[in-house]
Image (cartoon, rainbow, N blue to C red):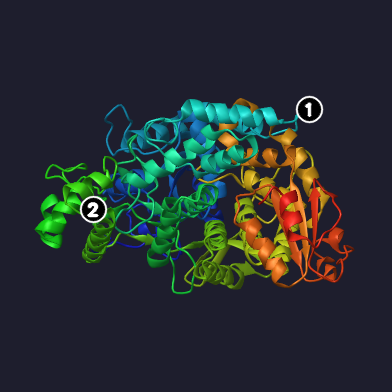
Amino acid sequence: MTPNQQANNLITEKSPYLLQHAYNPVNWYPWGEEAFEKAKQENKPIFLSIGYSTCHWCHVMAHESFEDEEVAKLINDHYIAIKVDREERPDVDSIYMKVCQMMAGHGGWPLTIFMTPDKIPFYAGTYFPKESKYGRPGIKEALEQLHIKYTTDPEHIADVTESVREALDNTIREKSNNRLTIETVDQAFQQLGRGFDFTYGGFWEAPKFPQPQNLLFLMRYYHFSGKTAALKMVESTLQNMAAGGIWDHIGYGFARYSTDEKWLVPHFEKMLYDNALLLMVYTECYQITKKPFYKNIAEQIITFIKREMTSKDGAFYSAIDADSEGVEGKYYVWADEEIYDILGEDLGEIYTTTYGITPFGNFEGKNIPNLIRANLESVAEEFDLTLSELTSQLETARLTLLQEREKRVYPHVDDKVLTSWNAMMIAGLAKASRVFQNQDYVTLAKRALSFLEENIVVDGDLMARYREGETKYHAYLDDYAYLIWAYIELYQLEFDLTYLSKAKAQLNIMIELFWDPHHGGFFFSGKNNEKLISNDKEIYDGATPSGNSVAALMLGQMASLTGEVDYLDKINEMYSTFYEDMMKQPSAGVFFLQSLLLTENPTKEVVVLGHDENVQEFLNHVQDKYAPNIALLVAVTPGQLIEVAPFAANYKMVNNQTTIYVCENFACQQPTNDIIAALASLGIK
């Protein structure tokens, strides 16, 4: 904020991103009818800017242009300016990002849209510098030229907007006469193989994103196909990421992406969703391999989340900024001499040798600690230490540096609570609690879930965002899909039928609000959401798995747990709805293909009745294994299942003892009291 600067129309908003712009000289409006009516009355186009509060290039454009009086005057004189937080309004962001990708051939944030008062774009781009340079048009030039075009050539504007309407209409998916088959899964695996970096792990060229949805898919593909290459791709990626600077070796947690192929230099912002999904990946990789390394990283992610991204009420914050004091990465990087000053000569020498710290630095003259070239055995030998002694000394150094780092100016935290992202973390914590047998993790998960249930539901409707006492925006598809996932993971941990009942209730509401009865699949916006110029039905994964892909997987899991075959019918319909998209680029929607792996391969549905020690012994054996093809339904008596899983309500307990029914694709074997026999029928020793 500049001295004596007047606040604009964003000042009453709760979004941290919008509030960052509340004292810009640009006369910003939030997305809403007031802005659109004003644009119509004054016959002005709309300048729409979409971003989020921890976005580095959003900050750059704000400082260069939106805080600049000259740029602000151009915007205020000729446009109605609207600011949108993409994390609050993913529906708005999704549509206009799609338009930007059509017009400019790429997308990203900040997203900059020039559009008519009817919300139809006629020009789109991402970051604009203030002045034209590096082959990029400057924002001043764009504002001036597009104002002239809008006022002097309305026919051209009409032609462009009509073509945009047609292009959006053409993206609406109609059901194909064809259906996806298991061959699509193999094609996706082959595509991922072609894009895999066999030196440093990960996919495609820099900048490299963790893409946890790829890794979750590959572990399931390995389980069903037995192809060890799939698991090797996962392990290589997880080990290289944890060695690189994208992993915070001092405070833990993963940054959003790496700017280079080695995972060395991150874009320093930390997102809740990345850490939630990577928690699941490292946990499952431990479950498959039993290698302590993956457990350590998973538990360190939780340590970071608990320390830096959890509110006093137990909910999880959205993101931590890349910038501190206006400088990207300043909070996280170190000068060589600084390490020695803090740790002393001896420990400093050990630490700098291990973590690649040099006087020259590896990032703008400073150092990002990393283990890319480290060999701990060699370092231990060099300093005449055992590996255990070296590990102990490095941990002492880490804690000392963390304590010193905490004296620095902390980056901005976006403390809004998003339903979908919180649900992801709840699901990850529940999975980690189950695999690592750690009760503290489920306590964290339950606290967050209680917060959501108490604060994110208004008049019976699920909402998308909470901040400072305000709950706002009807939930989107992702909110429902991820919340169902959280309930299922908690059920699979504790076998409390309350969670399964809640998952079923939310699933039925999701179908009612979002399902397309004509062509199948789920719309991004439901019957309760604001009607926009288009309603997306996305299957490709972005930074997170798409709502449709998560919804499909939850439909499959709930079908196995409840016996509701209608859920399977929905998935089968989706195999036709998204046939064309998935055949174009199978690897872009691999999370969805997990459903195909489950429906096209044998699955086991297990009903366990009883409450003695045999029940827990059986469950412990099953849960110790990575077995995505096994669904466990547990109750003390069959009568408890009448509402949530009526197919099993008539099952009988044999000999009044713990009784296990093992079914394959809903065809059940004879019930047994023999735990060993039941485990053997599941392929578990």
The one of 16 and 544 positioned closer to us in this rendering: 544
Q: CA distance from mark 2 to mark 1?
A: 55 Å
Residue 533: give x, y in percent of width and height: 61, 42
**Who is closer to the viewer here, 637 or 7?**
637
**Residue for badge 2:** 330
Q: Which residue occupies the foreground of this view, 444 or 82?
A: 444
Q: Secondary structure at mark 1?
A: loop
Is 197 situated left or right of 572 in this image?
left
Report the disc number at residue 415.
none
Viewer-nearest residue: 103 or 106? 106
- State the image coordinates of residue 181 (x, y, percent, origin top left): 72, 30
Q: Quadrant of the N terminus?
A: bottom left
Earlier residue among tags 2 and 1: 1
Q: Is 84 above or below relative to 614?
A: above
In the rendered image, residue 644, in percent from the top left (x then y), is placed at: 79, 63
- Give the answer, above or below, for where 162 lies relative to 405: above
- Helix, strand or loop at label 2? It is loop
| Residue 550, percent from left and from top | 63, 48
Q: How many marks?
A: 2
Q: Which mark is residue 177?
A: 1
Q: Residues within 10 Å of mark 2 (few under 14, many from 20)?
A: some
Amino acid at pointer 2: Lys
Q: Is residue 444 visible?
A: yes
Categorize mark 1 by other alpha carbons within 10 Å: few (<14), some (14-19), many (20+).
few
State the image quarter where residue 296 is shown. Answer: bottom left
Q: Identity of the amino acid at label 1? A: Asn
